[in-house]
Amino acid sequence: QVQVEESGGGLVQPGDSVRLSCVVSGRRTFDKYAMGWFRQVPGKEREERECVATINFSGDTTYYTDSVKGRFTISRDNAKNTVYLQMNSLKPEDTAVYYCGVSHLGTTTADLYVDWGRGTQVTVSS
């Protein structure tokens, strides 16, 4: 059984930094999957999650939504079955539940992700 577990969220102030982690267990071929970080705000459905960043299976190709470019960095450690999201210069509009997803493709479409974690809340407020 595949399990995806995010961690690292919390309440932070504008300008602060946070690193999210996502550990995937139950997939022996983690290094064959693309990974993505999405975020969801209240009132939005799962398929409306915003793709924040994606990373391909080897880690040498990444994507960022425009609003986080230059502030967020996605990375992965295939030896640890883990993907990270370093978030710097956080803004109140970054407040959301952040989800980690596993995909066969490097895609920004939430419906094409096969496994999801339960999410971790990030709240940016002074």
Image: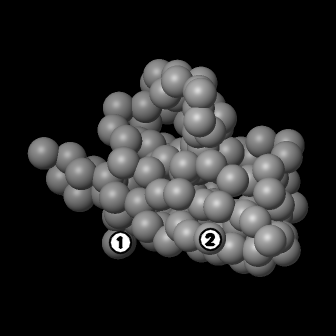
Give the residue at x 69% y 53%: 95
Q: Circle 1 is placed at which residue position?
A: 79
Three-letter amino acid code at the position of disc 1:
Ala
Q: Position of residue 42 (x, y in %)?
A: 59, 36
Query: How packed is label 2: few (under 14 Cα within 10 Å), some, or many (20 or more)?
Result: some
Quick one: which residue is furthest to the front in this view? 126
Q: Position of residue 31 (x, y in %)?
A: 38, 54
Give the residue at x 47% y 57%: 120
Give the residue at x 13% y 45%: 1
- Where the C terminus falls, by quadrant? bottom right
- Res. 109 visible in picture: no
Q: Quadrant of residue 52?
A: top right
99 horizontally vs 85: left or right: left
Give the residue at x 49% y 47%: 99
Q: Circle 2 is placed at which residue position?
A: 11
Query: How packed is label 1: few (under 14 Cα within 10 Å), some, or many (20 or more)?
Result: few
Q: Identify the mark at residue 124; answer none if there is no mark.
A: none
Number of labels in the image equals: 2
Three-letter amino acid code at the position of disc 2:
Leu
Q: Position of residue 76 (x, y in %)?
A: 51, 64
